[in-house]
Image (cartoon, rainbow, N blue to C red):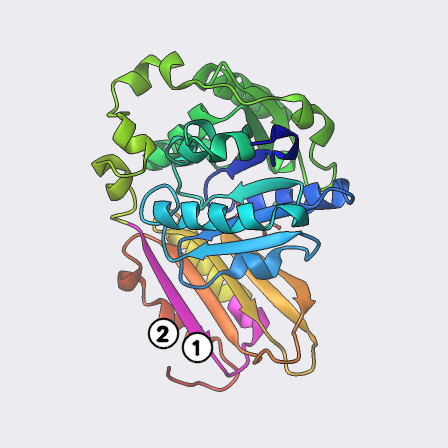
Amino acid sequence: MNTAHARPVTILTGFLGAGKTTFLNALMKSYPKKRFAIIENEIGQLNIDSSLLNENYGQLVALQEGCICCTLNDELYTALESLYQKQDSFDELVIECTGLAIPDAITEPFTRHPVFKSYFPLKKIICLVDAALIEDQIKERDEVLRQITAADVIVINKTEAVHSAYLSYLSNYLAHVNPLAKTLQSTVTEGFPFEIIEEIKYTKKIEAFSFLKNVNLSGSLILGKSSLAKQHLSDIATRVYTFTEEFNFVNLFLGLSKLVGKYPNKIYRMKGIGYKKDENKKIIIQTVGSRVDMDYGNHWKKDERKMNTLVFIGKELDSLSIQDLLIRMLTIKEKQ
Ligand SMILES: Nc1nc2c(ncn2[C@@H]2O[C@H](COP(=O)(O)OP(=O)(O)OP(=O)(O)O)[C@@H](O)[C@H]2O)c(=O)[nH]1
């Protein structure tokens, strides 16, 4: 193996909606000469993130309907084999994990596999956190703590949403949770500190944390097969709603705001693509916590059918009557 041809790997982690895709788009824009291969993993059976990415990547592999740290661990190896065959088409690999992935469980190919570890050396693990939501998310989901403790860089994102005093407290708190990581800050408007991030290298840290020693971190978890890794999504549901009829977007915004405001601990994330008959661009509809965002995205391609598709990720979703609510937001009521 000629390591001069190595393709360094960055694992991008962070809870649902922390800003991973936003970060990845900004990264590709900041390094226009670098060709990135991307492995994009989403829990739902629809890969909305692929539509949210700028299309200036070298290769894109979408792994969906599962999580690469557990149910799709074999597919990760298949994806790496296929990228290995296309080595001339990219310089670096970025893996955007699902917001619920446990990053320790996907480092194995890059740190231990006899072939891949030379060809795909692990460059670093970056964890994005949402400044306003991270403390609640740590309490709510074990995966969040695992993402933070695995990281070489913690990027506190959306800092404009919190007071500067809270930001210094949060920064200290995260540095305390993972003293081996560098903690940085970013906002969409000021951008991500890529130059500093570029200097930071991967360090193995599992042994460094005594509380992690108490968790079952056997070799089998690193292979993604332990019961912990298997069970971590057992309470998570995804629901996809599609409508060919147009939404009334004002009503949709208000309806979604009410819904996510009422169930912040049940609806973790919603991502969707909507359309307007007289508009050639997709409408990107998202919720993170109790915040709803709508914005224009890429153009509809000629062979794509215009329709509305919303993916909800959370717990006990069937008890929330989401479909009934969405039907009420259509310009003409229709049943799916
Ligand atoms: N206000 C604000 N919003 C941001 C910032 N960064 C990202 N967002 C928004 O947060 C939402 C989620 O961003 P994404 O980049 O899709 O987050 P993600 O981590 O890739 O989400 P998942 O793939 O679902 O886990 C989008 O609506 C972004 O526009 C920021 O710095 N400030």
Q: Please tell me which residue is depicted at 35% across the width and 59% down the height of the picture.
A: 238
Residue projecting furthest to the front: 1
Residue placed most toward the observer, 161 or 126: 126
Q: Secondary structure at mark 2?
A: helix
Q: Secondary structure at mark 1?
A: helix
**Does 144 sit left or right of 282 as displayed?**
left
Residue 291 x %, y %: 53, 51
- Can residue 131 be seen here? The reply is no
State which quadrant residue 164 falls in.
Answer: top right
Q: Is residue 240 magenta?
A: yes
Residue projecting furthest to the right: 33
- Whole-angstrom CA distance, mark 2 to mark 1, is 6 Å
**Does 186 sit left or right of 219 as displayed?**
right
Q: Is residue 125 magenta?
A: no
Q: Which residue is mark 2?
A: 324
Q: Is mark 2 within 8 Å of ligand 1?
A: no
Residue placed most toward the observer, 43 or 237: 43
Residue 305 x %, y %: 56, 80
Q: Please tell me which residue is depicted at 32% across the width and 43% down the height of the picture.
A: 70
Residue projecting furthest to the left: 227
Q: Amino acid at mark 2?
A: Asp
**Does 139 sit left or right of 251 as displayed?**
left
Please give the label number shown on residue 26. Answer: none
Q: Please tell me which residue is depicted at 37% across the width and 82% down the height of the picture.
A: 336
Residue 162 x %, y %: 59, 33
Q: Which residue is mark 1?
A: 328
Residue 196 x %, y %: 70, 24
Judge whether 122 appears above or below 79 on screen: above
In magenta, the rendered stretch is 236-252
- What is the crowding at mark 2: few (fewer than 14 residues within 10 Å), some, or many (at least 20)? few
